[in-house]
Image (cartoon, rainbow, N blue to C red):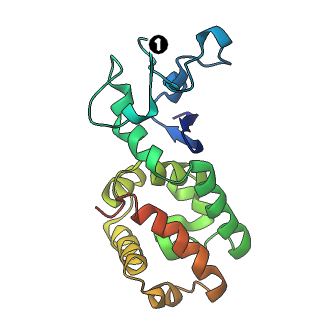
Amino acid sequence: MMSIILRILLPFGILVASVSGIDLSRLYGHSGVQKRSDACHPYEPFKCPMDAHCISIQYLCDGAPDCSDGYDEDPRLCTAAKRPPVEETASFLQSLIASHGPNYLEKLFGSKARDALAPLGGIEKVAIALSESQTIEDFGAALHLMRSDLEHLRSVFLAVENGDLGMLKSLGIKDSELGDVKFFLEKLVNTGFLD
């Protein structure tokens, strides 16, 4: 699958996330640079891909389709809009691997996370799955995780949700890394990853 850059203009900034599976180049109704005459009004920056009309950000993922094809309510788009940007997630995973070796993420994702996540499809694929998977079950299905690895990952997330840093330390996560790992995992927990 191709990875496309998703850019959703938010009132307080720009969220950028790479997502695969859905054609997010349709987000602006084009695949190149938008001409000024085609531009949506700043108050309605989201262009529906099929009918090319513009809608306000507040109508994205509000439960009522505003685009003729319902694109503004696509579950993967809506989940990705709530999550940390894929680039941020990929960068974080890459920094852990660069600092601690290619098998470091086995501590979180299990035995398939060896060799810089290669058996799971690589860092980008894992970052995309974390971004667009509504729940941990969806994440496990997207990456074909074994049940035991999925349950291990669930226990890590539950430990973070319950403030049990001892669990993370028992996995070999150093005190100097705890804050970053906890912060990253909490972002996912706070967007319904365990629901």
Quarter of image, res 2? top right
> In front: 31, or 82?
82
At 56% from the left edge and 70% from the top edge, which residue is drawn? Answer: 105
At 57% from the left edge and 49% from the top edge, which residue is drawn? Answer: 86
Question: In the shown orientation, is residue 167 left or right of residue 92?
Answer: left
Where's residue 15, x and y in %?
Answer: 57, 43
Residue reaching furthest right? 98
Label 1 residue SS: loop
Where's residue 128, x and y in %?
Answer: 51, 48
Q: Height in image: 67 above or below 80?
A: above
Quarter of image, res 71? top left
> In front: 122, or 17?
17
At 48% from the left edge and 27% from the top edge, which residue is drawn? Answer: 23
Residue reaching furthest front? 43
Question: In the shown orientation, is residue 96 left or right of residue 59?
Answer: right
Question: In the shown orientation, is residue 129 left or right of residue 16?
Answer: left
At 37% from the left edge and 81% from the top edge, which residue is drawn? Answer: 162
Where's residue 97, x and y in %?
Answer: 67, 68
> In front: 23, or 141?
23
> In front: 166, or 82?
82
Dot 1 amino acid type: Ala
Where's residue 136, x and y in %?
Answer: 35, 60
In which quadrant is the C terminus drawn? bottom left
Quarter of image, res 160? bottom left
Q: Residues within 10 Å of mark 1 (few under 14, many from 20)?
A: some
**Which residue is identified by label 1?**
52
Q: Height in image: 22 above or below 181?
A: above
Q: Height in image: 152 above or below 60?
A: below
